[in-house]
């Protein structure tokens, strides 16, 4: 399996998890303090720049360094937290999400080693957790992202016929910039008219890949010409990570009658302009998206999130609904790893 296909499979898994969370009416918390209020704990990087909630290291291949996280307990009970490294992934609508604990670490997450796999905090306590970062020799210049996740090791489960388990996880991003010649580049693949997932709302699916070695935020312009006339729309995407590919669901704000359509997509802002052409035949019409259909389209997590409340519900029939953790960095630019 190629590295690119591996990340695409994992990004799809993370996106599916986000969809389940959105439909359950849950929300990502806006900052570290909010994450602590939900789960009774939080984490922050120990660094000179206190305005930034994640690490940025500029390191050459073959170099190593150490660093520290600070975990804190704001609850009135002791808490045990699992500490582990994860890879960053591109969400289905762009922007960064982080892999789950069960996912194999295959990117820059493998460069990180925490000093301990678990930390226990008394009520109101704070404790530093060290880590070691080793950039492998021969690593190509470019942008890389991993993260340190802290997750409650003993999640509570409610009693009764329908049980709910709450798992709270927060992630601190670790961006590694390996200096040298690197460029941004977006490649556009197939484009087609499709309904947003689980709806009859119109959308243009644009397959795109970051084929460069830098994080970038492409601006996507799509034109649709056919039975319902010609129209053009532009969306500014969030970050797409190097080597990652997504099928971006470009919600189309117009009704589309049944018939044949020609589609042109253009991406700019990430290296040379990329253009793709396609055509689609709609057997039935599609309607303009509503707010409800936008939720089902798996909206990306908002910039600034640092925590995620996960719910696993098990009914009498044994059906389990789970969700993988997915967090983003605290600035507009999002991040991810590559080897």
Image (cartoon, rainbow, N blue to C red):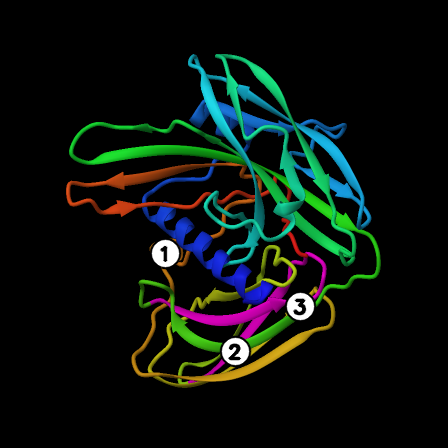
The structure residue drawn at horizontal position 50% and vertical position 77%, both measured from the top left corner, is 191
Q: Residue furthest right?
A: 180
**Pointer 2: what residue?**
190
Judged left or right of residue 59, residue 198 is: left
Q: How many marks?
A: 3
Q: Which residue range is magenta in the image?
A: 201-226
Q: Residues within 10 Å of mark 2 (few under 14, many from 20)?
A: some
Picture coordinates of residue 151 (x, y %)? 47, 32
The structure residue drawn at horizontal position 61% and vertical position 59%, both measured from the top left corner, is 240
Q: Residues within 10 Å of mark 3 (few under 14, many from 20)?
A: many
**Pointer 3: what residue?**
211
**Pointer 1: what residue?**
296
Compare marks 3 and 1 and give the one earlier in the sequence: 3
Magenta stretch: includes residue 338: no
Picture coordinates of residue 339 (x, y %)? 68, 57
> Is residue 158 visible in this depiction of the protein?
yes
Callout 2 secondary element:
strand
Q: Residues within 10 Å of mark 1 (few under 14, many from 20)?
A: some
């Amino acid at each position: 399996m190629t590295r690119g296909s591996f990340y695409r499979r994992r990004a799809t898994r993370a996106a599916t998890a986000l969809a389940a969370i959105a439909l359950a009416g849950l929300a990502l918390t806006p900052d570290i303090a909010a994450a602590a209020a939900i789960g009774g704990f939080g984490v922050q990087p120990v660094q000179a720049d206190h305005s930034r909630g994640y690490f940025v290291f500029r390191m050459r291949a073959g170099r190593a360094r150490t660093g520290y996280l600070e975990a804190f307990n704001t609850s009135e009970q002791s808490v045990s937290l699992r500490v582990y490294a994860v890879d960053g992934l591109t969400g289905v609508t762009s922007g960064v999400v982080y892999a789950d604990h069960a996912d194999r670490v295959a990117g820059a997450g493998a460069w990180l080693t925490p000093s301990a796999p678990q930390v226990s905090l008394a009520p109101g306590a704070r404790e530093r957790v060290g880590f070691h970062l080793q950039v492998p020799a021969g690593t190509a210049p470019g942008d890389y992202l991993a993260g340190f996740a802290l997750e409650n090791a003993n999640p509570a489960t409610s009693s009764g016929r329908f049980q709910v388990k709450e798992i709270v996880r927060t992630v601190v991003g670790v961006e590694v910039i390996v200096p040298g010649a690197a460029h941004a580049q977006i490649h556009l693949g197939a484009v087609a008219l499709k309904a947003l997932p689980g709806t009859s709302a119109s959308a243009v699916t644009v397959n795109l890949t970051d084929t460069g070695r830098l994080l970038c935020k492409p601006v996507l312009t799509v034109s649709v010409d056919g039975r319902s006339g010609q129209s053009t729309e532009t969306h500014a995407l969030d970050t797409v990570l190097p080597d990652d590919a997504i099928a971006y669901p470009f919600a189309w704000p117009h009704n589309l009658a049944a018939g044949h359509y020609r589609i042109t997509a253009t991406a700019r802002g990430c290296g040379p302009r990329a253009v793709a052409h396609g055509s689609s035949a709609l057997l039935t019409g599609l309607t303009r998206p509503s707010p409800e259909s936008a939720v089902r389209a798996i909206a990306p997590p908002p910039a600034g999130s640092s925590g995620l409340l996960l719910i696993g519900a098990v009914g009498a029939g044994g059906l389990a609904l789970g969700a993988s953790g997915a967090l983003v960095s605290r600035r507009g630019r999002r991040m991810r790893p590559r080897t």
